[in-house]
């Protein structure tokens, strides 16, 4: 158990100076878990503190508040990283975040005559000036980002079919250097993924807000089980890099950023949607199995070859084959059961 005084010391060792009253404020806001009482034995009294993982949560809280400046953004980032945050607080923080982003973009776009198209063109001009990459690739990327911005936010200009075609065009450009027409198979794949994952509900501003409102506490808790494991998987992968790579990054901040703005929102929505449609899919079990496997991989299991690439020990390879085979059988049995 870690007491508040011990946590302050550990934070100082990590280069973070926070007083006791700040930790109390974080706890009252829900950014840190409640203190837990632990007895010291008959006649010895008791102490109040947290479990060991509170240090990482405190570091992540500091990083999120420093980067975003608002408690609701920090709450959301912590929950999407799998830290101990109530589902009710997380849902309220997520809705506040989505509405904040929506309002900010609408206010910015309203300053342009062409609304979101004008905003997209303004962003393009700034990026074009700063970029030194291949011009043809850059223009394709900028065009895609302009169309994406408009599709995400402008209800009057929404055209799902046209946006799907644009995705196909981008995928075909990267996979087909000769620029031959995209295959019917690629169109079909994009269409199926779009339908199965309900892409507009994942990404479009208004629909994302409505989807988040519809999520129950049980659904939030279901997704939350895996978010912490995914964060730990990424952190462990970073630890398995060489020493120079570890020194070049802030592992907790780096992973928290990835979980809050990229991995967490997508994984959460996909898991909840999939659980609604196919509740028997072994998604949580698969993430847990990968987490358990990677936890047993150590830096000593990884070596660098003469050509600069990395390889793992035979023991790790053999263990991964067992995990993969087991997951294959689980998924096969589940899908067969659903199909029947």
Image (spheres, helix red, strand yellow):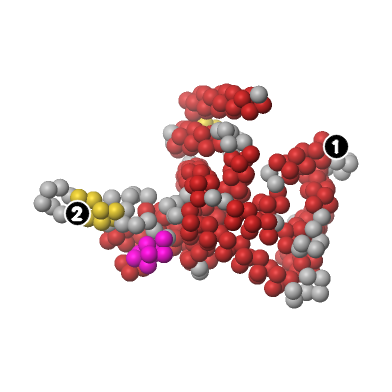
Q: Which mark, by number, is residue 184?
A: 1
Apparent side of residue 228 relative to residue 12 in the rendered image (left or right): right
Q: What span is colored magenta in the figure?
A: 23-30
Apparent side of residue 4 relative to residue 114 in the rendered image (left or right): left
Name, please, the residue furthest toward the right: 181
Query: Badge 1: few (under 14), some or many (20 or more) residues near its Cα, within 10 Å?
Result: few
> Residue shown at 59%/56% (left/top)?
213
Q: Is residue 31 above or below residue 193?
A: below
Q: Is residue 129 above or below residue 228?
A: below
Query: Which of pointers 1 and 2 indicates the residue nearer the eye?
Result: 2
Q: Can residue 180 be found in the magenta stretch?
A: no
- Residue 60: x and y in percent read 45, 57
Apparent side of residue 36 relative to residue 63 in the rendered image (left or right): left
> Residue shown at 15%/47% (left/top)?
41
Q: Nearer the viewer, residue 289 or 137?
A: 289
Quarter holding the C terminus?
Answer: top right
Label 1 close to label 2 by CB (< 8 Å):
no
Tell me the SS state at disc 1: helix
Apparent side of residue 132 relative to residue 275 in the rendered image (left or right): right
Q: Which mark, by number, is residue 101?
A: none
Q: CA distance from mark 1 to mark 2?
A: 69 Å
Q: Can residue 29 be found in the magenta stretch?
A: yes
- Residue 163: x and y in percent read 80, 52
Residue under numbered circle 2? 46
């Amino acid at each position: 158990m870690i007491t508040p005084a011990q946590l302050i010391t550990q934070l100082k060792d990590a280069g973070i100076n926070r007083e006791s009253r700040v930790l109390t404020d974080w706890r009252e806001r829900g950014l840190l878990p409640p203190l837990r009482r632990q007895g010291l034995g008959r006649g010895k009294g008791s102490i109040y503190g947290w479990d060991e993982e509170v240090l990482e949560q405190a570091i992540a809280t500091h990083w999120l508040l420093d980067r975003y400046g608002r408690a609701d953004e920090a709450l959301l980032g912590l929950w999407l990283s799998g830290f101990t945050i109530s589902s009710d607080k997380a849902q309220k923080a997520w809705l506040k975040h989505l509405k904040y982003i929506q309002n900010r973009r609408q206010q910015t776009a309203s300053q342009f005559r062409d609304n979101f198209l004008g905003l997209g063109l303004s962003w393009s001009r700034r990026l074009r000036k700063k970029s030194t990459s291949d011009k043809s690739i850059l223009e394709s990327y900028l065009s895609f980002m302009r169309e994406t911005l408009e599709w995400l936010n402008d209800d009057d200009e929404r055209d799902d079919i046209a946006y799907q075609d644009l995705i196909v065009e981008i995928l075909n450009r990267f996979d087909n250097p000769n620029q031959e027409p995209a295959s019917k198979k690629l169109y079909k794949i994009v269409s199926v993924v779009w339908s199965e994952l309900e892409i507009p509900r994942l990404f479009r501003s208004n629909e994302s807000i409505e989807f988040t409102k519809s999520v129950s506490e049980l659904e939030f808790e279901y997704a939350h089980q895996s978010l912490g494991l995914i964060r730990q998987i990424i952190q462990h992968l970073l630890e398995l890099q060489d020493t120079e790579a570890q020194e070049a990054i802030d592992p907790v901040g780096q992973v928290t950023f990835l979980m809050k703005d990229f991995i967490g929102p997508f994984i959460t929505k996909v898991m909840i949607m999939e659980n609604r449609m196919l509740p028997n899919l072994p998604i949580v079990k698969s993430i847990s199995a990968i987490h358990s496997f990677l936890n047993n991989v150590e830096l000593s299991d990884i070596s660098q070859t003469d050509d600069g690439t990395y390889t793992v020990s035979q023991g790790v390879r053999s263990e991964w084959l067992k995990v993969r085979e087991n997951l294959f059988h689980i998924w096969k049995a589940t899908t067969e059961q659903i199909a029947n």
